[in-house]
Image (cartoon, coloured by chain):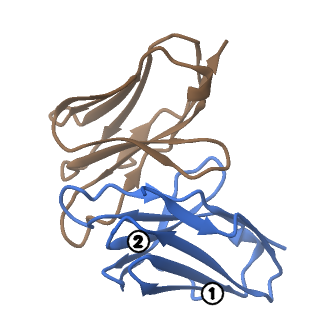
């Protein structure tokens, strides 16, 4: 079983829809959670960074963390064609010696159609 | 300035060539990373530098040789690569390696093709 599970998609939604992207994890040591957006043949772009359970909002994006269920989500409101990309969840324990390592999900490919 | 820059954007090299990839950040970050990413896969960690010292080497073959000349620069020297080393090479940096503020910021990558 992988430490981080993420549905690879592809996920296709119409423009304006609310998108829900999810990751589950098995390692209870993970304390820091990130969502990256990666366009084809480009580097990952950090969208959200959280380290506590609950919600964090930034514009059209909301990151949700439920440490008791080992489940994180990214919601995108009013989705746009420019949101079409691969979304990677990543997490780390934040402990000295292992903190540098991010464990990534496999990425979910999102397609927002007109 | 919240940017990590990488040069070159594209690189084609033969198996006998020696080349270098360069990464730069001016965010005052003290940790820098090299990742390798194959198509449709997440990035794989190769090396971590913390305060200009190599702290993690993920059992990377010696044909990849990292160097951190100062806190803003990170190089990856390539020699005698194999075609299977063709990939997107990503550099990242973070303010810290532990605790809060350890989120990593990635550069645009160097697309490497080994013939």
Quadrant occupied by the N terminus of chain B: bottom left
Element type where label 1 sits in the image? loop
- Which of the 4 image quarters holds residue B56? bottom left
The residue furthest front is B1
Q: Is residue B114 left or right of residue A63?
A: right
Q: Left or right: A100 with respect to A60?
A: left
**Residue located beneath label 2 in the image:** B32
Numbered badge on residue B63? 1
- Give me the chain that's brown: A
- The answer to whether residue B4 is seen in the rendering is yes
Residue sitting at 52 percent across and 10 percent down? A16
Q: Residues within 10 Å of mark 1 (few under 14, many from 20)?
A: some
Q: Where is residue B44 in the image (x, y as percent from the top left)?
A: 50, 62
Q: Distance between the residues labelled 2 and 1?
A: 20 Å
User: Is B51 in front, or is B60?
Assistant: B51
* Badge number at residue A76: none
Secondary structure at badge 2 equals: strand
Q: Residues within 10 Å of mark 2 (few under 14, many from 20)?
A: many
| Residue B93, x across and y down, in percent | 40, 65
Depicted B22 relative to depicted A10: above or below: below
Please determine if labels 2 and 1 lie on a single subunit. yes
Image position, residue A62 (x, y; %) = 32, 26
Seen from the viewer's position, the closer of residues B3 and A39 is: B3
Chain B painted colour: blue
Viewer-nearest residue: A48 or B42: A48
Visible in this render: residue A10?
A: no
Q: In this view, does B93 lie above or below A48?
A: below
- Label 2: chain? B
């Amino acid at each position: 079983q992988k430490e981080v599970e993420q549905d690879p998609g592809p996920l296709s939604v119409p423009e304006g829809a609310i998108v829900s992207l999810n990751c589950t994890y098995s390692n209870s040591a993970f304390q820091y959670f990130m969502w990256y957006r990666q366009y084809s043949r480009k580097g990952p772009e950090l969208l959200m960074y959280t380290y506590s359970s609950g919600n964090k909002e930034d514009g059209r994006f909301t990151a949700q963390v439920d440490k008791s269920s080992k489940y994180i989500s990214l919601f995108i409101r009013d989705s746009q064609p420019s949101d079409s990309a691969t979304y990677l969840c990543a997490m780390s324990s934040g402990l000295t010696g292992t903190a540098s390592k991010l464990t990534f999900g496999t990425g979910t490919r999102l397609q927002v159609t007109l | 300035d919240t940017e990590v820059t990488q040069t070159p954007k594209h690189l084609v090299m033969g198996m006998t060539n020696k080349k270098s990839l360069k990464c730069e950040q001016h965010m005052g970050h003290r940790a820098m990373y090299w990742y390798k990413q194959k198509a449709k896969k997440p990035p794989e960690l190769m090396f971590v530098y913390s305060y200009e010292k190599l702290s993690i080497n993920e059992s990377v073959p010696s044909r990849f040789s990292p160097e951190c000349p100062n806190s803003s620069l990170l190089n990856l020297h390539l020699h005698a690569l194999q075609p299977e080393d063709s990939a997107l090479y990503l550099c990242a940096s973070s303010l810290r390696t532990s605790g809060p503020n350890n989120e990593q910021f990635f550069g645009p990558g160097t697309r490497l093709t080994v013939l």
